[in-house]
Amino acid sequence: MPSSFLLSLNPIPFYFDRGNPIMDKYDIIVNAEQQFAREVTLGVIVTSPQTFWHYIIPGFFIIDFLRRGSAIRQYTQHFMFPRKLALQAAQAISEGGDNPSITSRLQEDLGQWLEALKLFSPELVRMHLKLIDVLIGHYAKLLSAEGNAFHLLIERAYQNHHNFSAFIEQITAAEKAVDDKVIETLGGDEKVKAKILAEQQQIEKRRQKMLEDIF
């Protein structure tokens, strides 16, 4: 079994990486966000009850394992798309990029992505842009902070518990607005609602743990 899919009984939080002076801050942030998405998916999977068939059908574990790997990849891709756009925009702005042209490119990329997911609507694009705006501010802080590990960038960018808690509230509200619109766009499907709720709970749990550990 690939080691990346094994769950440690006492895992080191992803944001307490040991640091790598070779990696620049952009890569540190991308790697941390990707690991966060994987941990959210694993958290949803671990807390999901197993059916009777998992225990009596030979080979079902292997099938389930492959499905879990696919779920992790899919969620990570969806989680990372707006975050990569935001990080690229934050970097471009810090280098003197033109804001109107950056916003236009964001709208274009978001529209194409949502079209591919069959979720396009002007309102959902607008809500994603609000989320990305919050993320741009967050990533701009991290990119300007000093440190060769993610937790150091967070600590030095936000300085204290209150500031980082305020960011968590802001990003949570923006994500919820997007999630609610996705549920509405998909017709209020109960399975979709349950899946998104489980993901929201895992995100909240991990962000609160990060807040407590760093500050």
Image (cartoon, grey):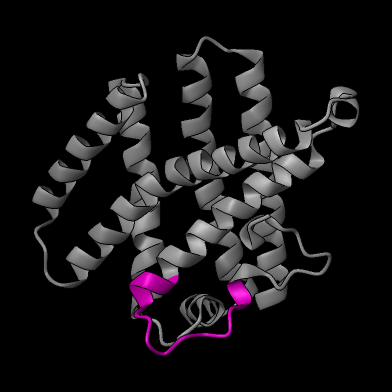
Tell me, yes or no, whether the highlighted magenta stretch contains residue 194: no
The residue at the far bottom in this view is: 21
Name the residue rendered at 68%, 57% in the picture.
206
* Residue 212 visible at all: yes
The residue at the far top in this view is: 187
Residue 127 place in picture, x, y as percent:
37, 34
Residue interval drawn in magenta:
15-28
Q: Quadrant of the C terminus?
A: bottom right
Name the residue rendered at 37%, 87% in the picture.
22
* Residue 203 visible at all: no
Q: Is residue 22 above or below residue 190?
A: below
Name the residue rendered at 67%, 32% in the picture.
197
Residue 144 place in picture, x, y as percent:
34, 79
Q: Nearer the viewer, residue 20 or 184?
A: 20
Q: Is residue 30 above or below residue 42?
A: below
Residue 59 place in picture, x, y as percent:
77, 33
Q: Is residue 197 above or below residue 204?
A: above
Left/right of residue 174 with respect to residue 114 in the rendered view: right
Q: Nearer the viewer, residue 208 or 14?
A: 14
Residue 211 falls in image quadrant: bottom right
Please give the count of numbered marks on the rendered protein.
Answer: 0
Name the residue rendered at 31%, 32% in the picture.
126
Q: Nearer the viewer, residue 210 or 18?
A: 18
Residue 158 place in picture, x, y as percent:
51, 75
Residue 199 falls in image quadrant: top right
Q: Quadrant of the N terminus?
A: bottom right
